[in-house]
Amino acid sequence: MSVILHGPGYSTYARTARLALEEKGVAYELNEVDILSGQGQAPEHLARQPWGKVPAFEHDGFILFETFAITRYIDEAFPGPALQPADARVRARMTQICGIIDSYAYGAMVGKVFWQAVVVPMQGGTADAAVLEAGLESTRRSLAVIESLVQGDLLCGGQVTLADLHLLPVLDYLVMVEAGQAALGGSPKLAAWHARMAARPSVMKTQPKLG
Ligand SMILES: N[C@@H](CCC(=O)N[C@@H](CS)C(=O)NCC(=O)O)C(=O)O
């Protein structure tokens, strides 16, 4: 059996897919497509992901992109603990949280806050204060909404679900920024959840390396 995840270790979406593979105990190869140096736009990667984004996933020749499709496939195609709740309403909350992350939280927390405060300076530039502030405002709204949906020790009750795996990499980057860490402090359930998640072997094993 061959499982390949195409995407760099520093990508939050690629990390979500890796977390799903780790939680299911699936052995896989990581093909580090370095999007920051333009490898996402190389023809061989565009053949896997037409927008040049990461991750893309391959299982015995079956190619898939879009992280939520990938993580659901991983959960359903491989043995191991279920990562989607059996109850329809709890599963709907899980899907809702993943949708909020895709539509609002990732863009604010990673695309604006982390990008301006960490990536831009790392690349020798100066953060745009207005973009950073807009990102923080939107971040606080996403955190408050997700906080209101938390249903237990983990986001959707007592079992780890795809919602946990989609949110963790994004918050890990958010808290690298002082103002992001302060924003998380305003959502006590999420802050406690984040601290709890840090001890999971899958989370420790997929720590991103930056710079
Ligand atoms: N809708 C995509 C989003 C993936 C995404 O935005 N990945 C980021 C890295 S975490 C990326 O590839 N960025 C490079 C770019 O936007 O060109 C998915 O769910 O997989």
Image (tube, rainbow, N blue to C red):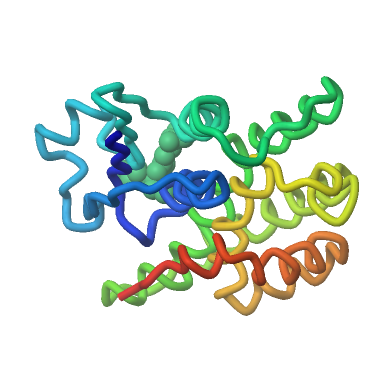
Depicted 16 relative to depicted 133: above or below: above
Q: Within the image, what quadrant is residue 140 found in?
A: bottom right
Depicted 162 relative to depicted 191: above or below: above
Relative side of 183 to 22, left or right: right
Relative side of 107 to 2, left or right: right
Q: Nearer the viewer, residue 210 or 87?
A: 87
Depicted 166 relative to depicted 88: above or below: below
The x, y position of residue 125, in whole percent, is 31, 73
Residue at screen point 53% across, 65% down: 173
Residue at screen point 28% across, 49% down: 29
How many marks are shown on the rendered structure? 0
Quadrant in which the C terminus appears? bottom left
Relative side of 173 to 46, left or right: right
Q: Nearer the viewer, residue 208 or 124?
A: 208
Q: Within the image, what quadrant is residue 162 found in?
A: top right
Q: Within the image, what quadrant is residue 102 found in?
A: top right
Q: Quadrant of ligand 1?
A: top left
Quadrant in which the N terminus appears? top left
The x, y position of residue 12, in whole percent, is 46, 53
The x, y position of residue 21, in whole percent, is 48, 45
The x, y position of residue 112, in whole percent, is 51, 56
Q: Residue furthest left?
A: 43
Relative side of 162 to 9, left or right: right
Residue at screen point 65% across, 70% down: 198
